[in-house]
Image: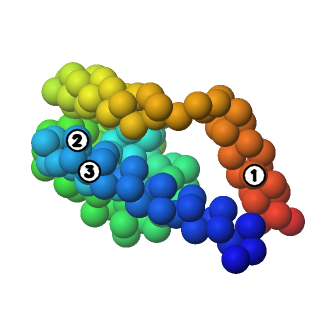
Amino acid sequence: MEQSQRFFDLLLDIRRLYVEEMNKVLLRHHLSSAQWLVFKEIAKQQPTTLVEVARSRRIEKPTATKVIHHLIELNLIETSEGTDKREKILTLTPAGSNHYATMLREVIQKQQEILAEVAHLEIVTDELAIIYQQLQKRKDE
């Protein structure tokens, strides 16, 4: 098998296993990994909008809308009117802020458990960052 194909196959397998492990943590909080990523994006960028979240997560607006409605139902985020009445500003609720801090600790702890045995993690991470930048550069050309 060609080396590059093997690399990408392993990368996809690692991602799948990682998502499975993260979903065990997130399930306790009634979230999927996709919902967690949107929730985390809102927490990091607040105040933000649906359009900004969809763009930064590289997801379609209808998908972002569905996830955001779920987060609102869980009382994790709230909306307010922007300058344009069609625009909704997204922020975490006080409960959402507390929930985010708890979840972040649990997710980070799980990540550390998964990676505790990986030797040379910094080198692997740096190399992956280079590969990502090269792929992004090609995409933008």
Task: Name the residue carrying label 2.
Answer: 25
**Any mark on residue 111, and which?**
none
Residue 24 appears in view: yes
> Mark 2 or mark 1, which has the lower sequence index?
2
User: What's under tag 2, amino acid-wise?
Assistant: Val
Task: Name the residue carrying label 3.
Answer: 23
Question: Which residue: 38% across, 55% down?
Answer: 17
**Any mark on residue 131, and which?**
1
User: Is mark 2 in CB contact (under 8 Å) with mark 1?
Assistant: no
Q: Position of residue 7 (x, y in %)?
A: 66, 62
User: Is mark 2 in CB contact (under 8 Å) with mark 3?
Assistant: yes
Q: Position of residue 16 (x, y in %)?
A: 41, 60
Q: Position of residue 23 (x, y in %)?
A: 26, 50
The answer to which image quadrant residue 39 occupies is top left
Task: Decide: is 50 above or below 93.
Answer: below
Q: Is residue 113 left or right of residue 135?
A: left
User: What's under tag 1, amino acid-wise?
Assistant: Ile
Q: Is residue 59 left or right of residue 105?
A: right
User: What's under tag 3, amino acid-wise?
Assistant: Asn
Q: Label 1 crowding class (10 Å Cα cut-off): few <14, some 14-19, many 20+?
A: few
User: Tag 3, which secondary structure?
Assistant: helix
